[in-house]
């Protein structure tokens, strides 16, 4: 089996997929952070393509950066200065060639994640 990475974002406060969230993927190697790609979620809260496709998969440490503040601003969440949640980094390791699914469950005042399937 070859490996790849996917995600989706659910807005738990509104009870719907989170459309239009900018997501950046970084590979972490010590102090070095390499931006691999930037994608946006579609109307189903998923990206139109794998975040890290099979052809580019390598084990190691990665970070997904979810730009939640931009989304919260667009969806009419009452503004704060500064926002409690703005940019959400999720750092994780991929130790084998497998399907890694790292979703984000988001509300204006909290989030959770897990390794999905």
Image (tube, rainbow, N blue to C red):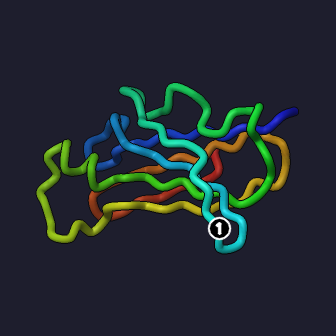
Q: Quadrant of residue 62?
A: bottom right
For this rendering, which residue is in front, 34 or 73? 34
Residue at the limit of the structure toward the right, as seen here = 1
Estimate the x, y position of residue 60 in percent, counting from the top left. Answer: 77, 57
Please state, as top left, top right, bottom left or bottom right, where the C terminus lies in the image. Answer: top right
Estimate the x, y position of residue 8 in percent, counting from the top left. Answer: 49, 39
Q: Quadrant of residue 84?
A: bottom left
Identify the residue at horizontal 65%, vertical 73% (top origin): 31
> What secondary structure is found at the residue carrying circle 1?
strand
Q: Tell me if 94 is positioned left or right of 101 in this view.
A: right
Identify the residue at horizontal 19%, vertical 43% (top origin): 74
Residue hosting label 1: 32
Q: How many marks?
A: 1
In the rendered image, the vertical position of residue 70 relative to residue 84, given as above or below: above
For this rendering, which residue is in front, 88 or 18? 88
In the rendered image, the vertical position of residue 109 relative to residue 114, given as above or below: below
Please state, as top left, top right, bottom left or bottom right, where the N terminus lies in the image. Answer: top right
């Amino acid at each position: 089996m070859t490996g790849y990475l996917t995600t989706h974002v659910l807005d738990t406060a509104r009870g719907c997929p989170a459309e239009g969230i900018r997501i950046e993927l970084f590979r972490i190697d010590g102090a070095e952070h390499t931006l691999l790609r930037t994608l946006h979620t579609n109307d189903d809260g998923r990206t139109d393509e794998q975040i890290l496709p099979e052809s580019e998969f390598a084990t190691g440490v990665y970070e997904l950066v979810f730009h939640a503040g931009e989304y919260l601003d667009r969806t009419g969440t009452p503004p704060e200065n500064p926002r409690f949640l703005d940019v959400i980094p999720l750092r994780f390791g991929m130790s084998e060639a497998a399907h890694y699914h790292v979703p984000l469950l988001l509300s204006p005042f909290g989030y959770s994640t897990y390794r999905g399937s």
